[in-house]
Amino acid sequence: MEVNISLNGIFLLAALQGWFPGSECQDYYAYLPQYMKALKGSCVEIPCKFNMETTDFQLVWYMDEYGSDPQIFNNKNPSNIIESFRDRTFQVENKSNSCSLRIDDVRHSETYYPCINGNINCNLVKGYNKVQVQVSDTQDKPVLKLPTNLTEDKPARITCSVQHTCTHNPPVLEWNKVGFNKREWREELEEGVWRFVHEMDYIPTYQDHGSPIICKSKYRSGQVSQETVTLDITLYAKVVQMGGKQTFIGDVLKLECLFLMGSPSSTQYSWYRNGISFNNETQRTLTIFNVKEFHSGNYSCNVHFQDGNFSSLILTVTVTQRRSRKPITLWCSLEEPPDRGSFLLIGALAWGIKKESEVREATYTDLIQRDASAEYSEFEVAETTDNPYAALQKPNTDTYEEIKVNPTGLNFKNDRIIIYK
């Protein structure tokens, strides 16, 4: 009995199909994937197209249910959409042969199919193409890619990517490390599935050695997934020159080997100049007294302790001759001879220039040991109760003669003042 009813229904549908004109269009189908995955609370974009060119068509999407197929999208009559799908479904592309659909806030696993103009992919007798959307509570984990070898202070390109099914609102990727030259893009892996990629340049540091690098993917629905990799960074010691960068012949050269991971008491050091072991030194600080020009070169150190050996980056040291004393000549042109007080001011100015130059060249030790009283004793102004300006106007032959033959490095010749530096 049931078989006869089913056959009668099929014959009736076949008769109706042959009765209505244009029924030959029933041969058109919509092309869409058979299966897709989606994250609960996120969105899914179902790719769909059909092979008939038309600029204005009616697109209706149905949910495949036994006994009734409710509409979940209708571009011509939105009021026909069932309540639970209103304001959640949208046509993705406005192309002449696109029937792609986006569903926001995906909730349940369901099967859907489209119908175009009432006769494309709508033949109940011949069947229709449909897609099963499988909804999961678990999101895909991001994928971290790092270079095999990470070296301290050497920039490395690192990448984090995650798959998703919605270009309208992709997940946001976040790092726990600072980077620069950041770049983002997406690429389609297959129909309805994309990969969102975030990459950046990262500079490994000794502080990061052994620590985790984490990439998190955050979805609009609030879900968060992450991937973690422990950083293995090749570390270097560093050679630091103490006392400044300039080294002159006769100076004391001090170099310190710094290993920023710490220096246990059992740590030993070895020093190298131009790649050759230097004086079998084993201390953290290398000291060279009365340095010579041949001490110039590329210095490096190795750190040896229980957990391993670490070599340093190279520090180039250049030993040069200290600058010699050269005279500076100041020319003074006057229409008439100055009075002695003005000449005293000119001499004091020149003497000040000389002393400023000496202070710039002096080392810290020289400044401490210098007895300034011996240098200032030559500039004695005549004792007077007058104000300083009036005192300068009074002739004082003794003071003038002292300046004339001042042994501090000033020579007065006619209209020239010669300063020896």
Image: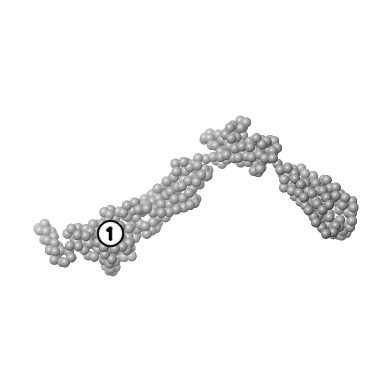
Residue 164 x/y as whole percent:
36, 54
Q: Is residue 302 left or right of residue 417?
A: left
Q: Amino acid at mark 1?
A: Lys
Pick whichever, 405 or 18, lies toward us: 405
Q: Pick the residue in front: 270 or 39.
A: 270
| Residue at the spot 77% in from the left edge and 52% down from the top edge | 330
Q: In the figure, 267 relative to 354: above or below?
A: above
The quarter of the displayed image where residue 3 is located: bottom left
Colour setting: one colour
Reading the image, the residue beneath label 1 is 49
The image quadrant where one finds the N terminus is bottom left
**Horizontally, is 10 left or right of 28 in the view?**
left
Query: Which image quadrant for residue 113?
Result: bottom left
Other-residue count near label 1 (Cα within 10 Å), few / some / many at <14 / 14–19 / ≥20: some
Q: Secondary structure at mark 1?
A: strand
State the image coordinates of residue 43 (x, y, percent, origin top left).
34, 58
From the top left corner, tell me how far across and down residue 107 is, in percent: 32, 58
Query: Which residue lies most toward the top here?
Result: 280
Who's the residue at 76% across and 49% down the image? 328
On screen, residue 253 above or below 170? above
Q: How far from the left and from the top, in percent, is residue 312?
A: 56, 38
Q: Is residue 379 visible from the viewing direction of this image?
A: no
